[in-house]
Image (cartoon, rainbow, N blue to C red):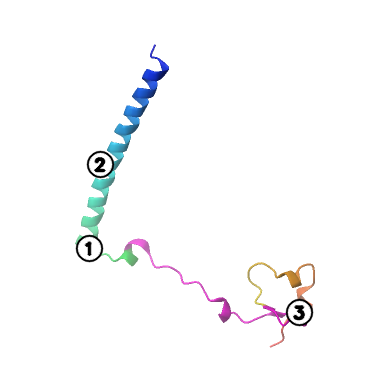
Amino acid sequence: MATYKELLARKQALDAEIEQARKEEADAALATIRETIAAFGFTPDDVFGTRRKARAAQNIAPRFRHPETGETWGGRGPRPRWLKGKDPEQFRVSH
């Protein structure tokens, strides 16, 4: 039976061999991907898709307004402190 130190040495050698195999296969896969992209003229948007643009908070009309401070909330995201535990309908903004 192998000793603990011998097993650790074999494990380290195997880990190094695994990492080398991963690197070689990753390099080959990347070369194939680059050839395919070049052959078909793919753009980054074709490969990765387009990013959705987040809607700016200022574009959301306020639906609730605090009568004393004038703070507003559009109804999205966490409920503001001034509205917690209260009926939001009493603070609804009429359009």
Contact check, label 2 and label 3, Cβ < 8 Å: no
Question: What residue is at 32 percent from the left and 28 percent from the top?
Answer: 13
Q: Is residue 14 magenta?
A: no
Check the image and report above or below for 73 versus 47.
Answer: below
Three-letter code for the amino acid on which mark 3 is drawn: Phe
Q: Residues within 10 Å of mark 2 (few under 14, many from 20)?
A: few
Label 1 sits on a secondary structure element that is helix
Question: What residue is at 21 percent from the left and 61 percent from the top?
Answer: 38
Q: Position of residue 91 (x, y in %)?
A: 76, 79
Q: CA distance from mark 1 to mark 2?
A: 25 Å
Q: CA distance from mark 2 to mark 3?
A: 63 Å
Three-letter code for the amino acid on which mark 1 is drawn: Phe
Name the mark on residue 95.
Answer: none
Query: Quadrant where the C terminus lies?
Result: bottom right
Contact check, label 1 and label 3, Cβ < 8 Å: no
Question: What residue is at 56 percent from the left and 81 percent from the top?
Answer: 59
Residue position marked by numbered label 3 in the rendering:
91
Q: CA distance from mark 1 to mark 3?
A: 57 Å
Q: Position of residue 56 (x, y in %)?
A: 53, 76
Three-letter code for the amino acid on which mark 2 is drawn: Glu
Choose the circle earlier in sequence order: 1 or 3.
Answer: 1
Closer to the eye: label 1 or 2:
2
Quick one: 94 or 8, which is closer to the camera?
A: 8
Residue position marked by numbered label 2 in the rendering:
24
Magenta region: which residues? 47-72
Query: Quadrant where the N terminus lies?
Result: top left
Residue position marked by numbered label 1 in the rendering:
40
Closer to the eye: label 1 or 3:
3
Check the image and report above or below for 49 versus 89.
Answer: above
